[in-house]
Amino acid sequence: MPDASDSILPDYQGLPRPVTRFAPSPTGYLHIGGARTALFNYLYARRHGGTFLLRIEDTDRARSTEDAIGKILDGMAWLGLDADRPPLFQFARADRHAAIAHRLLAEGRAYRCYATAQELEAMREAQKAKGLPQRYDGRWRGRTDWPEGQPYVVRLQAPQDGETVIDDQVQGRVRQANGELDDFVLLRSDGTPTYMLAVVVDDHDMGVSHVIRGDDHLTNTFRQLALIRALGWPEPVYAHVPMIHGPDGAKLSKRHGALGVEAYRDEMGILPEALENYLLRLGWAHGDTELVARAEAAKLFDLDGVGRSPGRFDLKKLESVNAHYLKLADNGRLAGLAAPRMEALLGRELSDSQRDLLLRSMDELKPRAKNLNELAGSALFLVRSRPLPMDEGAAKLLDDAGLKLLGEVKAALEAAPQWEREALEATAKQVAEAAGLGLGKVAGPLRAALTGQTASPSVFAILALLGREESLGRITDALK
Ligand code: GLU
């Protein structure tokens, strides 16, 4: 017998409160808006010593796929948004949802509706013609003249009088006249639960105390509250967070660019802590601090800091936050993230010694990159085979005058007593002074020879990193 009791699931009893949850529908990817919702729920629970839960709302069987579930779990793991319990899968609980609908039927708080699709269509047409709002008119309320063997849906007998008031933690006090509520469907004619029923039952059964979600759900909340009240269950605290908009102010959509977090990770080379910090600030403020890392956010985050107007997604800003976290990131981690991108660009694997060079170079490379693609691209010169390809600007630096200087530098470097950054720089300075030129004039051709580029980290750092043999070899190539 499916359970229609008021008890919450054993695994969820006695959880530290507040209990929040993220409840994505697995229909594609982990949307960045969803990621932000997850983050707010996570941080709220951490901030107040509560529990963060995950529920996969996989009731839309046509659109929910294993692949999409995998992407959500993967995205959450990447962002480090670990739930305190294994995920609850909504579809598996359809019997429990149905049992609750039948309980409401038995209690006279819900009723059978036998109206056919055509009949409902005609009802809406008539309402439209009269300029009335189109909603179910309660034609099967209170009736018991049930046609035998006909399919029916179960509808909630929603309150008609008074109003419902929500003290939303973000939106403030919002109200709706109950007359605007329709007797919405709880169970479809095939016995499957609707989203509205499933959400309410699952939130109750998981002991959820705080529902923090996108403000696109605000209108659903009035219906969900009507259902919760019919069941006599405790009402959660609600917080409806404004949607993320694109730079043009329209609701974020595909045409604004990537929507799934994996695109930020894979295609754009964003670090998870950067995406997290960016999403946090896009909708929440603590003074005008831009950079708030996880540990601090978990101490500071609260719903009163969540703004009421939609944040505008700004890729430039995300990249500047990313640049900040790249500078802070561990070199070994960054080398591990850059290496596969370099291998993809080169079409070959890096050797152990090249990986080692990449790691040793990281302090020079990471302050100059806004994302992992740039980091990988900026490291390629380190591992290219000789003779190096020259870009146009570099080739220009190696004109007659440049080559003459380079020859002089080469001779001085060959004679340098020590192959060490400061000493090498002092050597190059002497060459520049002897020629009556600034150091930059000497560094230009040297950089071109060592990297094939006009922009790079300090040439003296590069000389030291590449080592004597490779450096002099590259210079010799350029002089040929
Ligand atoms: N599954 C819903 C969604 O992805 C969220 C439901 C909720 O947060 O209550 O939009």
Image: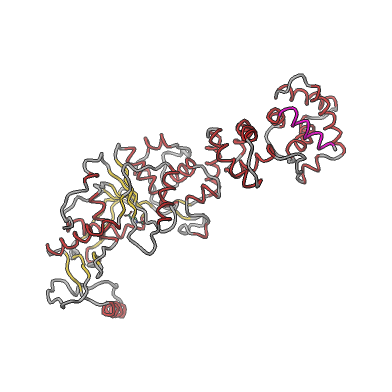
Residue at 15% of width from left, 53% of height from top? 5
Q: Is residue 50 left or right of residue 283?
A: left
Front-most of residues 331 and 426? 331
Q: What main secondary structure does the magenta stretch of the protein show?
A: helix
The vertical placement of 270 against 464, above or below, is below
Q: Is residue 19 left or right of residue 249?
A: left
Say whether residue 17 is magenta: no
Residue at 78% of width from left, 21% of height from top? 416
The vertical placement of 400 against 314, above or below, is above
Say whether residue 470 is magenta: yes
Image position, residue 478 (x, y; %): 81, 37
Which quadrant of the structure image shows residue 441?
top right
Image position, residue 179 (x, y; %): 22, 66
Residues in magenta, as a range: 467-479
Image position, residue 267 (x, y; %): 55, 50
Quadrant of the picture in which ligand 1 is shown: bottom left
Front-most of residues 2 and 270? 2
Which quadrant of the structure image shows residue 183?
bottom left
State which quarter of the image contains the N terminus: bottom left
Residue at 64% of width from left, 37% of height from top? 351
Q: Is residue 247 left or right of residue 190?
A: right
Is the image coloured rainbow, by chain, by secondary structure, or in one colour? secondary structure
Q: Looking at the image, how many numbered discs can be counted on the residues?
A: 0
Image position, residue 137 (x, y; %): 22, 73
State which quarter of the image contains the C terminus: top right
Which quadrant of the structure image shows residue 141?
bottom left
